[in-house]
Amino acid sequence: MPHKRSDSQADRIVSAFLISPLAFAASVVVGVFFVDIGLWWLICGFALLAYSAAMAAGMPSYLLYRKLKWNGWVHYLLSAIFVSGALVYFFVVYGAPPSGEGFADYIFNPVTVFLIFIFVVGPISTVSAFWLIARPDKIAA
């Protein structure tokens, strides 16, 4: 019979993986106030993206951090900042500006500002929500 404490730890980890990607979708709700675009398909799309990322990158990262005993909030925050930087680089900076616009016009375009906001706030809020729910620093190895 499993120990009661390990059951509650497992429940917190599963709950964290189920709830924390919704923070990414919530950041879309906040970001939509910048741009007048359809809301529901964006929330669903970014929630799907967040759940996919949580399973593809979040689960292996969690297991790696647990093995290396990197359980502090700072470790998780640094990984979220790295993911945010990669998303902004690949989708905003690396993406060619539309023809006829300068780079400054492209960066300050409302849609680009929306993407930067989402790609910075989304991963940081998701990782923070995961850490606050799962509390990997409290889990005995």
Image (cartoon, helix red, strand yellow):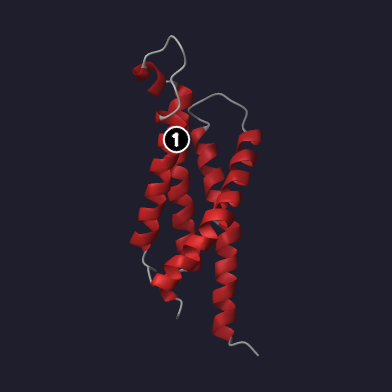
Q: Is residue 108 visible from the viewing direction of this image?
A: no
In this orientation, which residue lies closer to the viewer: 23 or 17?
17
User: Does 20 appear above or below 137?
Assistant: above
Q: Is residue 100 visible from the viewing direction of this image?
A: yes
Task: For the N terminus, give its image quadrant.
Answer: bottom right
User: Does 50 appear above or below 136?
Assistant: above
Identify the residue at horizontal 48%, vertical 44% (top origin). 122
Q: Is residue 99 left or right of residue 10?
A: left
In this orientation, which residue lies closer to the viewer: 105 or 90?
90
User: Does 121 appear above or below 12?
Assistant: above
Identify the residue at horizontal 45%, vertical 23% (top origin). 110
Residue 98 location (% of width, % of height): 47, 16
User: Residue extending furthest bottom?
Assistant: 1
Q: Is residue 34 left or right of residue 103?
A: right
Residue 62 location (% of width, % of height): 48, 64
At numbered mark 1, what does the secondary structure look like: helix, strand or loop? helix
Q: Circle 1 sits on which residue? A: 90
